[in-house]
Image (tube, helix red, strand yellow):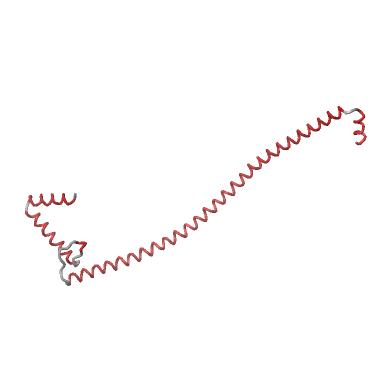
């Protein structure tokens, strides 16, 4: 789509006056020569490369300088990144330890609360057992009394004599 709009712009510029066409042609020549300074890299689609000149040597030096600058910047940023990671690992370790301590603290609190509740359950179970034992005692006592009443009077004397 951009190519179509560029062609339209070029056509309009050419229709509007010869200056636009001359500017476009001059631009194409200039960019072609700049590409040629890069020794005709295929990626840049240069039509031909210029012979090895002082200008191409200067371009090579500029590229070497830029590469050196970027390497230095990379070293600085890589060192900073590594230092940040060391700090992060330290922070992560400390945060995990604190988190684990908080978890243990909460587990301890929960266990204490659970023990209280379970003691209530045990107390309820014991209450049931105590009541059942009490009722069994009452039932047993009543049954014994009934049996004593059913026995002849002579049987009851032996019980009194033993006491």
The answer to which quarter of the image holds residue 31 is: bottom left
Q: Nearer the viewer, residue 124 or 140?
A: 140
* Residue 134 left/right relative to 60: right
Instruction: Residue at 15% x, 51% y: name it.
Output: 6
* Residue 98 left/right relative to 70: right
The answer to which quarter of the image holds residue 151 is: top right
**Residue 62 percent coordinates (x, y):** 23, 68
> Vertically, is 138 above or below 84?
above
Q: Nearer the viewer, residue 29 or 95?
A: 29
**Residue 9 percent coordinates (x, y):** 13, 50
Instruction: Residue at 24% x, 67% y: name it.
Output: 63
**Residue 126 percent coordinates (x, y):** 70, 39
* Residue 89 left/right relative to 117: left
On the rendered image, what quadrant is the C terminus found in? top right
Instruction: Residue at 22% x, 69% y: name it.
Output: 60
* Residue 99 left/right relative to 10: right
Q: Nearer the viewer, residue 47 or 98?
A: 47
**Residue 82 percent coordinates (x, y):** 40, 63
Instruction: Residue at 49% x, 58% y: name it.
Output: 93
Count of numbered marks: 0
């Amino acid at each position: 789509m951009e190519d179509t709009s560029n062609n339209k712009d070029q056509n309009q510029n050419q229709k509007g006056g010869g200056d636009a066409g001359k500017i476009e042609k001059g631009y194409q020549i200039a960019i072609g020569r700049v590409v040629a300074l890069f020794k005709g890299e295929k990626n840049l689609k240069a039509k031909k490369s210029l012979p090895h000149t002082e200008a191409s040597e200067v371009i090579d030096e500029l590229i070497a300088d830029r590469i050196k600058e970027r390497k230095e910047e990379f070293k600085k940023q890589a060192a900073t990144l590594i230092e940040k990671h060391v700090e992060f690992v330290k922070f992560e370790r400390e945060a995990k330890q604190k988190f684990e301590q908080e978890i243990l603290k909460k587990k301890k609190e929960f266990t204490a609360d659970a023990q209280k509740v379970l003691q209530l359950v045990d107390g309820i179970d014991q209450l049931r057992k105590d009541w059942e034992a009490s009722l069994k005692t009452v039932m047993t006592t009543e049954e014994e009394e009934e049996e004593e009443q059913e026995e002849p009077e002579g049987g009851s004397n032996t019980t009194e004599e033993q006491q």
